[in-house]
Image: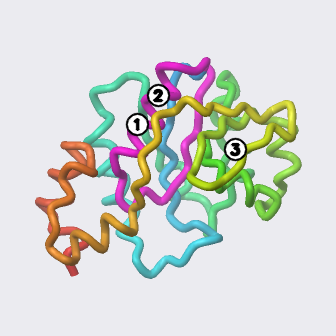
Amino acid sequence: MKIGLFFGSFNPMHIGHKIIASYMAEFSDLEKVLFVVSPENPLKQKKTLLDQAHRLQIIIAEVEDNPKLAVSDIEFSMPEPSYTIDTLVRLKEDYPENEYALIMGADNLQNLHEWKNYEQILENYSIYVYPRPGIEISRTHQNIHIVDDVPYMEISASFIRDSIKQGKDVSYLIPEKAWQYIDEMNFYKK
């Protein structure tokens, strides 16, 4: 099975994440998209990060009814900070029958050269890149696939967190089941 890996902190998951994952699962050659919840991003600060178990549950609640979308906690049992190459190696060891590809925004592609063993990733895995505002995408490698028709919404998790803290209604920016979980647990309000 060809599985697209959508890595992120998903702090919180929002409709932009779900649109990208759903689009890739339906309109590319990927058979399934796996949200890989990262406990810690080595390039980001951890101070505003909701507990990993809750971030995982929020996505599970949202995708459990869609057979083409799933979520993984594989990085929870790996050394921190987690590096994409280590996760890819572990997935291939645990599930050698699958073919894995990465899904990332153009902003991440620009920073790929900062990733641990990025050359190994480029040589061994397909990378599906979706557009980000103000960032030119060029296909610089045979394994880079530009998917520029992905519906784009300029939403950030930090905007959502800040808005919730200010008492704003952001229920329209978060998928329904994910929002119910966040609202019931009173997350991001302090």
Which of the two residues, 89 or 104, is positioned nearer the viewer here?
104
Considering only vertical position in the picture, is 39 above or below 155? Answer: below
Give the residue pinned by disc 1. Answer: 19
Report helix, strand or loop for mark 3.
helix
Name the amino acid, label 3.
Leu
Which of labels 2 and 3 is toward the front?
2
10, 64: nearer the viewer: 10
Residue 6 appears left or right of 86: left
Which quadrant of the structure image shows residue 67?
top left
Residue span colored magenta: 1-29
Q: Position of residue 20 (x, y in %)?
A: 47, 37
Say what secondary structure mark 1 lies in.
Answer: helix
Position of residue 104 in the picture relative to residue 58 (left or right) = right
Disc 2 and disc 1 in contact, CB within 8 angstroms? yes
Question: x and y percent of residue 174 in the render?
Answer: 27, 50
Instruction: Say if mark 2 contacts mark 3, CB within 8 Å.
Output: no
Which residue, given by chain and number where applicable, does mark 2 sit on?
Answer: 23
Which residue matches tag 3?
Answer: 88
Q: Mark 1 touching mark 3, by CB under 8 A?
A: no
Dot 2 alpha-carbon crowd within 10 angstroms: few under 14, some 14 to 19, many 20 or more: some
